[in-house]
Image: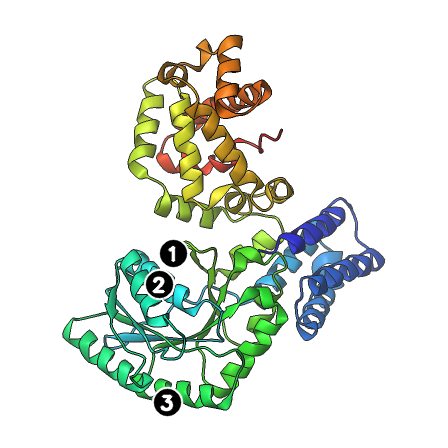
């Protein structure tokens, strides 16, 4: 998400950072570039105008002009105003009610509500240690109930069965009754979507809202619809009091206009970003961290949190202990690191959170970076156990055999071995500094894609 905007803004602000002094003229030029970048990101025009005016008012004041480092002061202002547009601080779920707390999910058809319900259940169980019950009140879409039942099983959440012949209100009441008897902490209620906002849809969801009295009413919307996502959220909020927004498919949105517009247009916070089809693809929305990502400054906090949550700690600790004892980092270990990278969403997901790596993002756009990992794994799989343990024995004839066995070239084998040497040095360095997390922080920066 924000790839295009990050490229434009980081380039523009880098130009400003190279200037010793700033004049009103070059601030105006920079702001024109910023405005153009935001509009290309499909941010709503009123949001862009207000953002640019606020930056301009501060940039032309004493804060920048009398600063010892005006360019840095200007970048700081842009960052702070971006945080303001995005929502200041992470607003978590308000579950401080008598159990069970109900989270009602609303939105148009195809926005990803059912998948989001399962992702949210997984997030609550892992991060908040909550006992969660999933229930579907979507009696219109074929197989909606079955889909949620299947996803519930995949995330190990409890599921309340319902039937298309029932009324949504009756389903909700029965689910709440069961939740109380089973001492459930949170009930996530998936509601029906429509292809557009209509009176029938709104009256039904209003009735549901009145009956279940949700602690949270989250609007689930496809971020790829850009500023339309914010406008749709506003229309929903006008009819039904929302408590927050979940932006889905954010990994497929290179512009970021929805995220930039939602808070200011609706007045409601973005609470989560949904990424990918995997059920761990839900990320708490921290405006300050997202602003840093947009400006190409990275998001190390989220990267480390993700590492601690998703990496195999036992494997990482074993590797740490092995290297600390003076044993070498071999190709089996390198393959393990590739697996760890996949668990963290792949190379592109990691690079966007690493400071100064926005330029490298272009090298791994789409599936290119992930394909390179697969190719390198194939090379390692073509080696003998002894070659994986002792890469130094790989001579010319062995390289030829490995290349043929994996369907690749000798140059690819050479590149892999070079990457292994670099990684071995890095692992040794991080091991001396101590700790699994420090070792894993360096994981994503170990290499650019191999390429042909």
Separation of disc 3 and disc 2 at Cα?
A: 24 Å
Q: Residue 124 at what x, y percent from top left?
A: 32, 62
In the image, is 296 to the left or to the right of 147?
right
Name the image quarter holding the N terminus: bottom right
Q: Mark 1 highlights which residue?
A: 279
- The answer to whether residue 189 of the structure is visible from this angle is yes
Q: Residue 330 at what x, y percent from top left?
A: 40, 20
* SS state under label 1: loop
Q: Residue 54 at what x, y percent from top left?
A: 69, 69
Vertical comparison of 120 with 69: above or below: below
Vertical comparison of 62 with 359: above or below: below
Depth check: 202 or 241 in front?
202
Q: Are marks 2 and 1 in contact (CB under 8 Å)?
A: yes
* SS state under label 2: helix
Say which residue appears at 75% left-offset and 50% top-offset: 16
Say which residue appears at 45% left-offset and 83% top-offset: 241
Depth check: 318 or 338 in front?
338
Separation of disc 2 and disc 1 at Cα?
A: 7 Å
Say which residue appears at 31% left-offset and 87% top-offset: 211
* SS state under label 3: helix
Q: Are marks 1 and 3 in contact (CB under 8 Å)?
A: no
In the image, is 135 to the left or to the right of 344?
left
User: Label for residue 118?
Assistant: 2
Question: Which circle's residue, 2 or 1, is located before the other in the chain?
Answer: 2
Q: Mark 3 highlights which residue?
A: 207
Q: Residues within 10 Å of mark 3 (few under 14, many from 20)?
A: few
Question: Which circle's residue, 3 or 2, is located before the other in the chain?
Answer: 2
Question: Which circle's residue, 1 or 3, is located before the other in the chain?
Answer: 3
Vertical comparison of 275 with 332: above or below: below
Say which residue appears at 49% left-offset and 90% top-offset: 199
Residue occupying the far right of the picture: 25
């Amino acid at each position: 998400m924000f790839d295009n905007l990050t490229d434009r803004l980081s380039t523009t602000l880098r130009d400003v950072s190279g200037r010793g002094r700033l004049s009103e003229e070059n601030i105006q030029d920079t702001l024109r570039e910023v405005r153009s970048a935001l509009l290309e990101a499909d941010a709503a025009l009123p949001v862009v105008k207000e953002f640019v005016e606020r930056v301009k008012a501060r940039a032309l004041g004493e804060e920048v002009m009398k600063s010892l480092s005006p360019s840095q002061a200007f970048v700081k202002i842009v960052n702070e105003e971006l945080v303001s547009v995005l929502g200041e601080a992470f607003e978590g779920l308000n579950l401080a009610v008598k159990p069970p707390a109900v989270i009602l999910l609303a939105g148009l058809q195809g926005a990803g509500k059912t998948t989001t319900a399962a992702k949210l259940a997984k997030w609550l169980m892992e991060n908040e240690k909550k006992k969660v019950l999933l229930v579907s009140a979507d009696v219109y879409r074929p197989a909606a109930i079955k889909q949620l039942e299947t996803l519930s099983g995949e995330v190990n959440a409890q599921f309340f069965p319902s039937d298309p012949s029932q009324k949504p209100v009756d389903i909700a009441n029965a689910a709440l009754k069961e939740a109380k008897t089973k001492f459930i902490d949170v009930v996530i209620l998936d509601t029906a979507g429509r292809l557009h906002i209509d009176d029938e849809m709104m009256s039904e969801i209003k009735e549901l809202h009145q009956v279940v009295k949700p602690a949270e009413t989250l609007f689930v919307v496809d971020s790829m619809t850009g500023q339309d996502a914010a406008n749709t959220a506003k229309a929903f909020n006008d009819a039904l009091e929302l408590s927050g927004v979940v932006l889905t498919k954010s990994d497929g949105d290179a512009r970021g206009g929805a995220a930039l517009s939602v808070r200011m247009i609706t007045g409601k916070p973005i609470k989560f970003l949904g990424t990918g089809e995997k059920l761990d693809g839900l990320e708490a929305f921290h405006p300050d961290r997202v602003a840093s990502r947009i400006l190409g400054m990275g998001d190390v906090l989220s990267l480390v949190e993700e590492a601690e949550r998703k990496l195999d700690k036992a494997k990482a600790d074993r590797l740490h202990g092995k290297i600390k004892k003076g044993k070498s980092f071999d190709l089996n270990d390198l393959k393990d690191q590739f697996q760890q990278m996949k668990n963290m969403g792949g190379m592109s997901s990691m690079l966007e959170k690493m400071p100064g790596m926005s330029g490298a993002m272009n090298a791994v756009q789409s599936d290119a970076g992930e394909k390179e990992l697969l190719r390198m794994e194939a090379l390692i799989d073509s080696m003998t156990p002894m070659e994986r343990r002792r890469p130094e024995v790989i001579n010319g004839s062995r390289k030829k055999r490995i290349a043929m066995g994996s369907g690749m070239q000798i140059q690819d084998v050479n590149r892999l071995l070079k990457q292994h040497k670099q990684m071995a040095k890095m692992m040794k360095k991080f091991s001396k500094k101590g700790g699994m997390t420090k070792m894993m922080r360096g994981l994503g920066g170990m290499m650019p894609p191999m390429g042909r």
